[in-house]
Amino acid sequence: MGTGRTQAVPEEYRSRRSCLAVPGSSQRFLDKARGLAADEVFLDLEDAVAPAAKSQARRNVVAALASGGWDGKLVAVRVNDATTRWAYRDVAEVVGQAGRGLDVIVLPKVSDPGHVVWLDLLLGQIEQDTGGEVGRIGIEAQIEDARGLARVDEIAAASSRLRALVFGPADFMASIGMRSLQVGAQPAGYLGSDAFHYPLLRILVAARSHGLAAVDGPYLAIGDLDGLRQAAVSAAALGYDGKWVLHPGQIDVVNQAFSPSQDDYDRAELILDAYHYYTSVEHRGAVMLGEEMIDEASRKLALVVAARGRAAGLPRRQRFEPPAPTGQARARQAPPGQARARQAPPGQAAPSGPGSADHSPPGESLSQAAGQG
C-alpha cells in the first residue's frame, strides 16, 4: 500500500553494519556517541527513556542534532510507537526543531502499515511547514510482534520513505509466548536448530522484495562478545545488513561481522568498474572478467559488497584496466572480451572507477540493488 503523498527521493547507500542505541535522557552518552565507530547512531526516546523523562529527553535530542558533529554517521531518532501519547510530540518537536540534522526516524512496534503511513504524512507536513525537502527523512520500521510479522510485506510497501526493516526480538518473543527470559536465546525444550530463523528470514525477504535494508536486533548479554560474534556472523550470513548494538564494546565485533573480506572487496570493485566500462563504452551486457562471466546481477551483488568495504575503510589493492583498442599493440593483453586487473603500487590504494560503490547509478540505493538481483 503506497501513500501516494510523497515522492521517492533517491538515497545514496548508507552502511548500517552497526546501529548504536543511545538513550536520549543521558547527556553523557549523547556526547560520547559522536566519537564512536558505529555506522548508524539512533538517539532513543522510547524504551531507554522513563515516562517521566520523555520531555527532557526530547530537548536533549534536539540539542544533540542541532549541534552537529555526527559527520560520517547515519543519524536517527527512535520515537515512541504510533499508538502512544508521546509519538506525536516526539516527531513534531524533533523534526520541527532539528530535522536538518536527521537522516531517519526509527518507528518501533509497527504492527500495521497504517503506522508507517501516519508517520509519512506527519513528516511531510512538518517538512512543508519548515521549508525542508519533502521526503528526505527516511523511516526504519521495527517489527516486534506477531501482528507485525504477519503483515510485514504490507508494511514494507507502505511508504517510499522506508529505508530498512528492523527485527525486535524481545517484544516478539513475548508476543508469541516463547518460553525464554533471555532475549535471543533458544527456548528451553525447543528441538529445532533456530527458533528465530523464520522471523528473520521473513523480514529479510520482505525487505529485499521492496529494496530495503534488513537489520537484526540487539544482543543483550553485553559482556558475551563470543555470543555476540556468533549471532552477528549468523545474521550476516543469512543476508542481513547489520545489527543493533547497545554498548560501545559491541561495535567492533559487529562491524567486523558485517564487513567483507579484503579479497571479496577487491573483487567487488573490479566487477563494478569492469561492468561500467563494458556497458558504457562497448555497450555489452555480459562479459568475462578473468574466468568469471559478469552481468547486471553481478553488478548488483558487487555494489553491496563494495559499499560495505568502503564503510569498513578497506583499501583497494587492484584497479580495472580496460583492454587495448582493436589493432593497437599492447603488452600482456588479456584475451578478447576479457579484462585485466592491475595491482596498485605497494601502500597505495587504487582509485575508484565510475562504476564503483562511490559512483552507483543515480537513484539506486544499495539495498535496492541487493533486493532486486
Image (tube, grey):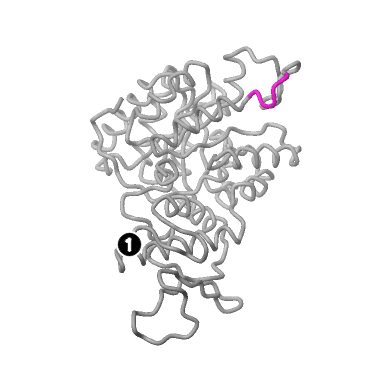
Vertical relation: 135 (above or below) 107: below
Residue drawn at x 57%, y 79% is 345
Q: Nearer the viewer, residue 320 or 86?
A: 320
Residue drawn at x 53%, y 71% is 318
The answer to whether 269 appears left or right of 35 in the picture is left
Residue 262 image-quadrant placement: bottom right
Residue 81 image-quadrant placement: top left
The magenta stretch is: 191-195
Question: Is the stretch drawn in magenta largely helix, strand or loop?
Answer: loop
Q: Quadrant of the N terminus?
A: top left
Residue 190 image-quadrant placement: top right
The answer to whether 289 appears left or right of 255 in the picture is left
Q: Nearer the viewer, residue 324 or 41?
A: 324
Residue drawn at x 60%, y 42% is 236
Q: Nearer the viewer, residue 31 or 33?
A: 33
Residue drawn at x 40%, y 69% is 337
Task: Tell me residue 9's x, y (percent).
Answer: 30, 44
Task: Tell me residue 299's x, y (percent).
Answer: 42, 54
Counting the numbered discs, the total is 1
What amino acid type should be assigned to the residue bearing mark 1?
A: Arg
Task: Tell me residue 351's x, y (percent).
Answer: 47, 71
Secondary structure under the numbered disc 1 in the rendered image: loop
Vertical relation: 287 (above or below) 199: below
The answer to whether 37 appears left or right of 351 in the picture is right
Residue, disc 1: 284
Vertical relation: 132 (above or below) 341: above
Residue farthest toward the top in the current orientation of the protein: 177
